Every structure is written in structure tokens, then in C-alpha cells.
Image: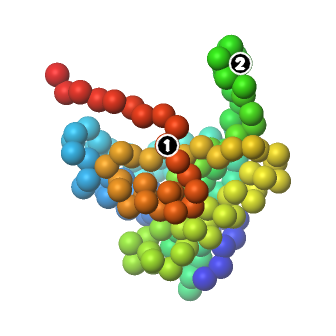
């Protein structure tokens, strides 16, 4: 297994990984608010790639036997116009996607992808890394905790 920067030859594999993650989220979504739109595979990939291009981002993939078995995407977005009013605004990287195929888990691939993205963010003088994690994704919460990430914000929800 090797980690490389994304190239177009792996686009179909990356799309498959994005769908695999969304299907997993659907399976654990106790609120039943998520869905898998028929255009998800193509559109989510397109949106992620645009976000990377527009926000100094990178996409790294874990490749084994010429197939992408994991992907991480990250960006370095600018702050909004008035964020400085109540926030110090340190430069930060944002992990927007991290997926390792179910068949390839428990091999530290996710950890290697995360370290690769952190190295990129450090090279760009980022001081922090932000990652949103779906509250019902206990596996991801444990994974990030083991990698020294902690919650900073909670989103509360109530069905009416």
C-alpha cells in the first residue's frame, strides 16, 4: 500500500469510496435525515474537487494493487468577513472527507492518510485541523480521539 496525491486515473475509485461512506452514514443515521440522491456519486465528487481547487486543498489516496482503497480530502479555507469579531482566526486546515474501504480497515490506512494531510497542512503553516464527525459515527469518534482530536462544538437536534 502506498499513499499518493490524487490523480484522475483513480476518480472512479474515489467516487465509490464517497458512496460507501454515505451508505454507511445512512445505515447509522438514527434521525433518518440523510439520503443518497441518484446524482450523489458524480455531484459529491465534483463538489469536493471544486472545494479542493478553490481552497488550497489536497486529496491523497491510499493505493493497493492499482486501486484506491482510501481517500482523504482537505482544504485551507479563508475566514468569513466578520469571523475576527469573536475569534482569533488562526490558519486552519479542514479535513472534508476521510474514507477507508470496509475491506481495508484495521490496517492503519486512515491514520497514515490523516498524517499525510496533517503534514500538508503544517507545510502551509496551518495551526489547527478541523474535522466534522457525524455524531452517530462512534467508530470515527474513537479513531479521531486516538489521533489526539477532541470535540470543540456540538450541534443539537430535536425532532418536532
In the picture as drawn, the residue positioned furthest to the bottom comes out as 65
Q: Nearer the viewer, residue 72 or 83?
A: 83
Q: Quadrant of residue 53?
A: top right
Q: Residues within 10 Å of mark 1 (few under 14, many from 20)?
A: few
The quadrant of the image that shows the C terminus is top left
Q: Residues within 10 Å of mark 2 (few under 14, many from 20)?
A: few
**Secondary structure under the numbered disc 1 in the rendered image:** loop
Q: Which residue is mark 2?
A: 84
Q: Position of residue 28 (x, y in %)?
A: 26, 53
Residue 151 marker: 1
Residue 115, relative to residue 77: is it above or below? below
Residue drawn where x is 54% and y is 42% of the image: 47
Q: Position of residue 159 (x, y in %)?
A: 19, 27
Q: Position of residue 39 (x, y in %)?
A: 38, 46
Q: Nearer the viewer, residue 23 or 16?
A: 23
Residue 38, relative to residue 113: is it above or below? above
Amino acid at each position: 500500500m502506498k499513499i499518493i496525491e490524487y490523480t484522475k486515473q483513480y476518480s472512479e475509485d474515489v467516487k465509490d469510496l464517497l458512496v460507501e461512506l454515505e451508505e454507511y452514514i445512512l445505515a447509522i443515521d438514527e434521525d433518518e435525515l440523510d439520503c443518497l440522491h441518484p446524482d450523489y456519486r458524480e455531484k459529491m465528487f465534483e463538489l469536493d474537487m471544486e472545494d479542493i481547487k478553490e481552497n488550497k486543498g489536497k486529496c491523497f489516496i491510499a493505493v493497493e494493487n492499482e486501486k484506491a482503497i482510501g481517500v482523504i480530502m482537505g482544504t485551507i479555507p479563508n475566514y468569513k468577513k466578520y469571523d475576527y469579531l469573536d475569534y482569533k482566526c488562526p490558519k486552519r486546515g479542514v479535513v472534508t472527507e476521510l474514507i477507508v474501504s470496509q475491506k481495508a480497515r484495521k490496517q492503519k490506512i486512515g491514520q497514515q492518510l490523516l498524517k499525510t494531510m496533517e503534514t500538508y497542512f503544517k507545510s502551509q503553516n496551518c495551526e489547527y485541523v478541523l474535522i466534522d464527525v457525524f455524531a452517530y459515527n462512534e467508530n470515527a469518534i474513537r479513531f479521531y480521539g486516538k489521533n489526539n482530536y477532541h470535540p470543540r462544538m456540538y450541534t443539537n437536534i430535536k425532532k418536532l
